[in-house]
């Protein structure tokens, strides 16, 4: 799968979770908690593979892409802060729904800018072979990067590469422990 198709598939899968959250009733705490956990994992992994591999390639793909990538990094930072807050909250918390609503607004805005502005320029600037290679690299990175938000970690290379792999390993160890704990 080429890089753009892979990232768009991730966007669709996160949007599906957003719709599930929006469809859950006000008192559907268990559903909301499960859906938000899935949102945290999917968005953390997606943001990480973009920051680690896609954005560095995108920055060099065309003359106008660098400022778009810089804006994207700021948007990631902003929604990762919300994800980090949500990680510590429960659906019964007074501000839980409000925080998820703001998260959804921010991510929808970010996704539409990527798909309408950045991705078309990257598609033009990189060869089909490079896009396919990059797609394979993104796919492989999914199983190594962080599953949690880490808003204070570096989000550009080279600091990102090392910090991401270390926190990815730690997150996966924590995920494994939490999944076996009743
Ligand atoms: Fe992004
Ligand atoms: Fe994205």
Image (cartoon, rainbow, N blue to C red):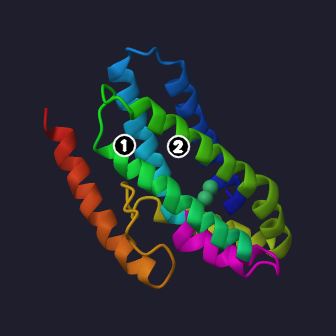
Split into quadrants, the picture shows ligand 1 in the one at bottom right
Residue receiving disc 1: 86
Q: Quadrant of the N terminus?
A: bottom right
Question: Which mark identifies residue 103?
Answer: 2
Residue, far right: 124
The answer for how far apart the CA atoms under marks 2 and 1 are is 10 Å
| Residue 146: image location, x then y, percent | 38, 61
Q: Which residues are magenta?
A: 50-66
Residue, far left: 181
Q: Is residue 139 visible?
A: no
Q: Earlier in the sequence, mark 2 or mark 1?
A: 1
Q: Quadrant of the C terminus?
A: top left
Q: Is residue 4 visible?
A: yes
Residue 122 sits above or below residue 156 on the image: above
Residue 182 sits above or below residue 60 on the image: above
Question: Which mark identifies residue 65?
Answer: none
| Residue 160: image location, x then y, percent | 44, 77
Are circles 2 and 1 on residues that touch, CB within 8 Å? Answer: yes
| Residue 86: image location, x then y, percent | 36, 43
| Residue 17: image location, x then y, percent | 52, 33
Q: Residues within 10 Å of mark 2 (few under 14, many from 20)?
A: many
């Amino acid at each position: 799968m080429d890089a753009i198709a892979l990232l768009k598939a991730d966007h669709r899968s996160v949007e599906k979770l957003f719709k599930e959250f929006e469809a859950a009733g006000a008192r559907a705490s268990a559903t909301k908690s499960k859906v938000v956990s899935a949102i945290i994992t999917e968005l953390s992994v997606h943001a990480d593979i973009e920051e680690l591999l896609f954005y560095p390639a995108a920055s060099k793909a065309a003359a106008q892409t660098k400022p778009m990538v810089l804006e994207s990094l700021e948007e990631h930072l902003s929604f990762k802060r919300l994800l980090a807050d949500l990680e510590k909250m429960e659906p019964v918390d007074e501000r839980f729904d409000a925080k998820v609503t703001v998260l959804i607004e921010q991510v929808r805005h970010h996704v539409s800018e990527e798909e309408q502005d950045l991705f078309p320029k990257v598609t033009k600037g990189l060869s089909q072979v490079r896009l396919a290679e990059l797609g394979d690299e993104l796919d492989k990175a999914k199983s190594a990067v962080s599953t949690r938000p880490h808003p204070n970690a570096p989000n550009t290379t080279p600091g990102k590469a090392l910090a991401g792999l270390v926190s990815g390993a730690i997150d996966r160890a924590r995920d494994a422990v939490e999944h076996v704990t009743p």
